Amino acid sequence: MINLPEEYEKEMRSLLGAEFEEYKKIYEQPVRQGLRFNPYKLTKPVWEEIMPFEKEEIPWVENGYYIHGGEGNPARHPYYFAGLYYLQEPSAMTPASRLEIQPYDKVLDLCAAPGGKATELVGRLQGKGFLLANDLSNSRAKALLKNLELTGAPNFYVTSEEPAKLVKSFPEFFDKILIDAPCSGEGMFHKEPKMAEYWLEKSPDYYAEIQKELIVQGAQMLKPGGKMLYSTCTFSKKENEETIAYLLEQCEDMEVLAPLGYGGFSEGFPLEGKSEEMCSQLKKCVRIFPHKMAGEGHFLALLQKKGNGEKSVPRKTVAAKKDEKPDACVEEFLKLVSFDFSEGKLKKEKDKVYFLPGDGNMPKLRYLRTGLYLGEIRKNRFEPSQALAMALSPKTFASCVLLSSKDIRTVKYLKGETIDVADLKPAKEKGWQLVCVDGFSLGFGKLDRGILKNKYYPGWRMQ
Ligand SMILES: C[S@@+](CC[C@H](N)C(=O)[O-])C[C@H]1O[C@@H](n2cnc3c(N)ncnc32)[C@H](O)[C@@H]1O
């Protein structure tokens, strides 16, 4: 049983009153775990037909399911490597599910790493429009990039920037913004007891200052008519309702909307000393308490900027060149691919080739990735990337090695081994193959006389 910090207990008692004892009992129960299928690659009926785990739906998240002990390790199943799902605590699935993303939206996830929400946002775009996923921490942004590449979506950028820099580049630009703010993590104490120790070092007061700055910066980048979702995985009013009240006082054109409800959600708390109008807005915020529903705890506020969304362009863009004619080796490889390149443009940078979403005009920033990385030209040969493999399927690549998840060769491939596939008869007997598990891409291989040379990205191998 975890020892909660004394000061934290005092604050929670004052927040929850008589319910506090019930809240404390959750620490005697197992942590709730979940997975969310990837909406870019799957529909619900398809997932439910193939899902290898027990089917228990998370009632307030359309594509979320609980996972239980005894179901093997879901982080080692081949479907995980195919990007078919993301492992996530159930209440953490809520913010992205309530941001109403539509294809063609321009979306910003300001504090995105490691990508629990960004992977859902990009999936909902269905390859149209784009997501800019940012995180101040460069090392965390690398994990974010991997998780986004695993989804197979081609339309995202990853940056590691100070939000103030983004504000200068994107004034009133985005249709949708998610701010999943750094916070004191009180909702994580159950899952990661170490968080309770960090709480003593950096308490809600510390984070509240950062959050106020972030939320106003978010509002500055939101189009009139655009929607923004602010969330935390903490319970303190200082980091939640007080941050929202601060935003409403600073930006009169922002208002709180009630997101799609669920019986287990609780209302936001009114704040002492604030007007009735302010308190009625704060009550539209959503509280997820672990003793009231099967999730570890979250806060969310869906916000909108008043007015009509006008089309806007980022300031000071570096104009992408007109669709560049690819090198002959790239062109040759792309003959194998029937991917829709009409929603963006090709760009070569040194020897690397990218597919940029939309018009490709973006400001100068610290990018970790611009669009879909297609591959690299080495000594006049084109080596396709792991990210491109993830974006393809048997319908969009000329020749595939189709493995089943039960076939031992699937795991061997994921471990980086050469495999004998002479029995499988792909369309082309020599050259590049897309290796798939039950029809979903895993990576590339190169075939010669029945032997498949492994081209799975070494950094992603199954250990
Ligand atoms: C709660 S976590 C985000 C979790 C992520 N949204 C997810 O679902 O996987 C907050 C993130 O904010 C980042 N961060 C901290 N300060 C920031 C700032 N000033 N601007 C942008 N990101 C920041 C941290 O590095 C951390 O990755």
Image: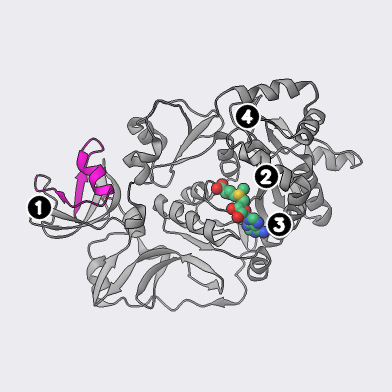
Q: Circle 4 sits on which residue?
A: 262
Instruction: Give the mark, 2 or 3, whose residue is nearer the N terminus.
Output: 2
Task: State whether residue 177 appears in this view.
Answer: no
- CA gap between label 2 and label 1 equals 55 Å
Instruction: Give the mark, 1 or 4, whose residue is nearer the N terminus.
Output: 4
Task: Nearest to the eye among marks 3 and 4: give it.
Answer: 3
Query: With 317 as the anchor, is 204 left or right in this view?
Result: right
Q: Classify mark 1: helix, strand or loop.
A: loop
Question: Which residue is depicted at the point 64% across and 41% down?
Answer: 195
Residue closer to the observer: 169 or 191 = 191
Q: Amino acid at mark 3?
A: Leu
Q: Amino acid at mark 2?
A: Tyr
Quadrant, the N terminus: top right
Question: Which residue is depicted at the point 28% across and 48% down?
Answer: 414
Q: Amino acid at mark 4?
A: Tyr
Q: Residues within 10 Å of mark 3 (few under 14, many from 20)?
A: many
Instruction: Give the mark, 2 or 4, whose residue is nearer the N terminus.
Output: 2
- CA gap between label 1 and label 3 equals 55 Å
Any mark on residue 198, and which? 2
Q: Start and end of the magenta stretch?
A: 397-423
Residue closer to the observer: 391 or 161 = 161
- CA gap between label 1 and label 4 equals 54 Å
Q: Classify mark 2: helix, strand or loop.
A: helix
Residue closer to the observer: 3 or 308 = 3
Instruction: Give the mark, 2 or 1, whose residue is nearer the N terminus.
Output: 2
Any mark on residue 450, and which? 1
**Which of the 4 image quarters holds residue 429?**
bottom left
Q: Please, is residue 189 above or below residue 116 in the view?
A: above
Q: Classify mark 3: helix, strand or loop.
A: helix
Q: Circle 3 sits on which residue?
A: 214
Q: Does the closest atom of ligand 1 sit within 8 Å of the Cβ of label 3?
A: yes
